[in-house]
Amino acid sequence: MEWHDDAIVLSSKPLGESGTILELLTRDHGRHAGLVRGGATRRIKPTLQPGNTVHVGWRARLEEHLGSFTCELARARAGELMDSREALAGLNAFTAVTSAAMPEREAHAPVFLGGEILLEAMMTDDTAHWLPLYVRWESGLLEALGFGLDFSECAATGAKSDLTYVSPKSGRAVSRDAAGIYANRLFKLPAFLLDVSAEPVDGEVAAGLALTGHFLRERVLKPHGKQMPAARLRLEAITGESE
């Protein structure tokens, strides 16, 4: 068995004296692990840092085997991302959520492509730009996994305007009028999730993280006995400080 693909490094763990177990988010083969022989050596180790994009080859005798990777650096990001507290928090949240939520070896190319766009945005160190992208990426992840949020119309009335809330049960939008006295039981729907050209106002990014985080936890992680990664919780804390 053999294939070649583009991939984002999620994590690397040492194995033995010089080997590395590498976890990747590939474009066409999903979240995938493999052994890199010599991955802990000074020559190869910098390539295998989280956030970098690599051209990867995978080979194994049988499809179900761990297999081995060969990697060639395509885009180095790790060093720059680690220089910024906020960007590092975003990188750690991205890699942790991907590792926890993505099924192993299940291809979701839009999640990979969105991750590439997000990581490039983090390189600018402009949180006002990349934090909304992060929320959109999590929303796209939910959709890819079959748990997409529905902002097309009000769940109660069918209205298509003034959609300001989301039901924590159905994941569907609710209009301001329909919410009424129950508004405090609903999630706020940030305008930037309805209109990609909209700029977030104070508190909207935090509201977006609370929204996508709830459905990731309840629909994706909990059914598999998982908790929200600590790195994702730290991103929420940093976002609260900045807003």
Image (cartoon, rainbow, N blue to C red):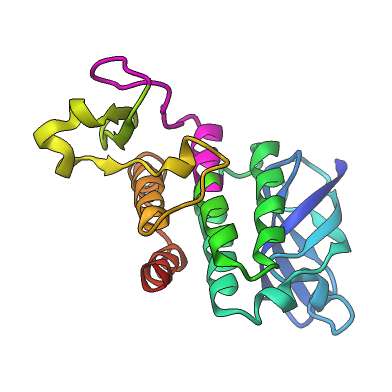
Please say whether residue 20 is one of the residues in the magenta stretch. no
Image quarter for residue 82? bottom right
Q: Which residue is drawn at 57% across and 51% down?
A: 133
Is 31 drawn above or below residue 34 in the view shown? Answer: above
Image quarter for residue 202? bottom left
Quadrant containing the N terminus in the rendered view: top right
Q: Which of 41 and 175 is in front in this view?
A: 175
Q: Nearer the viewer, residue 50 or 200?
A: 200
Horizontal side of residue 223 vs 41, given as left or right: left
Q: Which residue is drawn at 33% across and 47% down?
A: 214
Question: Can you give x and y, in whole percent of width and height, for residue 153 in the image?
Answer: 37, 21
Horizontal side of residue 228 vs 140, given as left or right: left
Image label count: 0
How would you classify the magenta stretch by its main secondary structure?
Answer: loop
Question: Can you give x and y, in whole percent of width and height, for residue 164 in the image?
Answer: 31, 36
Question: Can you give x and y, in whole percent of width and height, for residue 89 in the image?
Answer: 53, 71
Is 235 drawn above or below residue 99 in the view shown? Answer: below
Q: Nearer the viewer, residue 21 or 211?
A: 211
Please say whether residue 152 is one of the residues in the magenta stretch. yes
Q: Which residue lies furthest to the top in this view?
A: 158
Image: magenta residue range: 137-160
Q: Residue at x 32, y 43 (%)?
A: 218
Question: Can you give x and y, in whole percent of width and height, for residue 3 in the image?
Answer: 87, 42
